[in-house]
Amino acid sequence: MKVESTQPMQDKKKRKIRLIAVLFIALLVICTLLGNTLQALTLPKVATIQSSKGALVHSYQGSATVRSEMERDLLNPMNWIVEKLPVQVGDKVEKGQTLVEYDDRSAVQQLADEQSALQKLELSMKQLEQQYIQAMQTEDEMAKSSASSAIELAKIDIATQKSHIQIGMGELEEHRRIVAPFAGIVTDVNAVVGLASSGEPDIRLANASAGFRIDLQIPADVAALMKEGEDLDVLLSGEKTRILAGKVASIEAGDGPPVDEDSDSMGGNQTAVATEKLTVSLQDKSLQGGERVKVQILKSNPEEEILLSNQVILEDNEGSYVFTLEERQGPLGNAYYAVRTPIKKSDSNGSMTAVSEGLFEEQQIIVVGDHAIMDGTRVRL
Amino acid sequence: MKKLNVLPMIALTIMLGAVAAAMLIPILLTFTNSLMTEQEIGRNYDLIGQMTDVAAGGKDAFVNLKILPDWLSLEQYTQLLIFSPKYLRMFWNSAAMVVPIIAGQTVIAALASYALAKLRFWGRDKLFMLYIMTMLMPFQVTLVPNYLVVDKLGLMNHEAAIILPGIFGAFGVFMLRQFMAHIPNAYTEAAKIDGAGQWTIFSRIIIPMVKPGLAALIVLLFVDYWNMIEQPLIFLQDSAKQPLSLYLAQIDKEARGIGFAASVLYMTPLVLLFLYAESYFIEGIQLSGIKG
């Protein structure tokens, strides 16, 4: 009887326990399955890149104007007014060819004045000779000697005047026109018909046979990988686009602006970059000087090292470092941690850095985003 | 007569009540502490072992056994169930070892004890004695041979190193044999006359009759293997394979709160199983006790 009366209570109790057990196991199962997901939602999400070996490429792209190796500025020393200008920029001229003619009327007038003065002197000479003859006839010693001196003085004056005229004529002949001192190409004309010189050279003449050159301000890291005598192709832009063979003539420490105005050091790093002046000589018959050319230099560092994007490299007072991704085997899957890894930079360009120590190939490097990451921070991918 | 019986009853009640309280208070404390914040637990226990000068204004060095938490906090459980995947992993590790052991040992023990109790063959009792002797030796005694066997079988660091010896444990055989010996042979003989084979007798007659014993065995085995320490400590070096019983040992002072919560979750399956099988269990223990 007793057993029968307690049986329904026992069953009820068992049902309750079964329910609790089911709920308990369900809770554990849900936590097991979703625990990682819930946990992951609270962790900073990071992106990674894989480190790889390669040669660091230093690049430079810029443009420059072709200049002749030998250029001569032809000036107007007398500051005369330009009368005729038979040449213009780009004209090929022969040696001795007239380039500019000047208005020489004032000089001609001055020369005429000088010649009149000479004639006057010659006339006075005749008077002095008459005086000397009269003195001889009077046998007045005093008069004789003074007449003789006067004649000598007049002779000197005449000689000086003749010399002046001579020089004046020579100058007139020399300066009334500018002639080409050598066969070449007119690269610049500042002279204007009807006006005197503005202070700049009237004509700039380039010697075509001496060759051409371009000057470039290139980043020092690119310059360090170049050597004098090396071949360098340049692209002639404009109507007649083609590639010209050039040769590096000299590399000098630069003092110009960081990088050429048109240049684009890859990556767009805006900080001032140390530059060097690169001179490239061009030997090409068709060049005239003044053309714009484009230059692209791609130089890879001979040593293969781990290459990293500059954006993953961080700096502090202890040096450069990156956060590498460490995978730790967890009981329920793998957990990822950010590990501070010091590195040694060996070379860098605007966008990439070569790392000589601290990393190995195919390591996962964390791209530090908006999240503050510290050494040992657990992260999710 | 009645008056004489009241006093001993009161005395007995008080005594048993005290014993029950001594048993229950730690469990109650564990449960309530698991609902406290880490700071509150720190305030309650940090003074243990510190001698402070009370006269100079220092706090006394007694443990503040607080039953009710200031603030109910599920932080420890969140930490454990969500942010410590290791705990759940170990929980399932435990389950993955205990369930096969119990299933295996129950089946093996039922079959073996049937043979030892109800079949007649030469050397039966000697064989049983031999079997019992293995049970009498504690694990530490057989540790080295066990280790060598496991190593030779290539089971080191594998759950089978725990499960296989567990399945063939002697305790289940011993316990169920006592149960079956208690069943009068008249049942089996009657079945035999009716044309039942051994399997029919075993499955239709004996097993239903030893249900309380099976329930008791399951509870006892569960307690035994859920709490095992030495075997996994020795045979499972890989922490990802270790069971929950080893987790509590790894909790340090800074994570006492976690420890309380871990303990509560740890004992929940045991408590649920015991409550479920309580009636069978008591009956089973009684029966085996009478005959054993």
Image (cartoon, coloured by chain):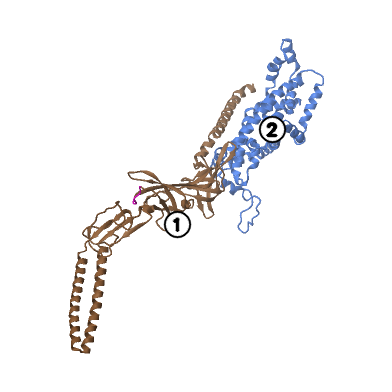
Chain colours: A brown, B blue
Question: Residue A185 location in percent, x, y?
Answer: 32, 53
Question: Which one is nearer the viewer's eye here, A268 or B186?
Answer: A268
* Residue B16 image position (x, y, % from top left): 68, 37
Q: In front: A150, or A35?
A: A150
Is residue B38 a member of the stretch shown in magenta? Answer: no
Task: Give the residues drawn in magenta, as a range.
Answer: A286-290
Image quarter in which the N terminus of chain A is found: top right
**Disc 1: host chain:** A
Where does label 2 land, which residue?
B224
Residue A167 picture quarter: bottom left
Residue A122 location (% of width, % of height)? 19, 75
For the question of whether residue A130 can be seen, the reply is yes
Name the amino acid, label 1.
Glu
Q: Of the numbered discs in the image, which one, if any, rests on residue A233?
A: none
Q: Is residue B205 found left or right of A125 in the rendered image?
A: right
Q: Is residue A77 above or below residue B228?
A: below
- Residue furthest to the front in view is A137
Q: In the structure shown, which secondary structural element does the residue marked by tag 2 occupy? A: helix
Q: CA distance from mark 2 to mark 1?
A: 86 Å
Q: Quadrant of residue B181?
A: top right
Viewer can see residue A266: no
What amino acid is found at the position of numbered circle 2 in the picture?
Asp
Q: Are marks 2 and 1 on the same chain?
A: no
Secondary structure predominantly adopted by residues drawn in magenta: loop
Residue shown at 72% from the left, 10% from the top = B195
Q: Residues within 10 Å of mark 1 (few under 14, many from 20)?
A: few
Q: Residue B210, relative to residue A75: is it above or below?
A: above
Q: Residue at x 66, y 25 (%)?
A: B103
For the residue labelled by badge 1, is the local secondary structure a helix, a strand or a loop? strand
Residue name at image x 66 percent, y 51 percent: B49
Q: Which residue is mark 1?
A: A252
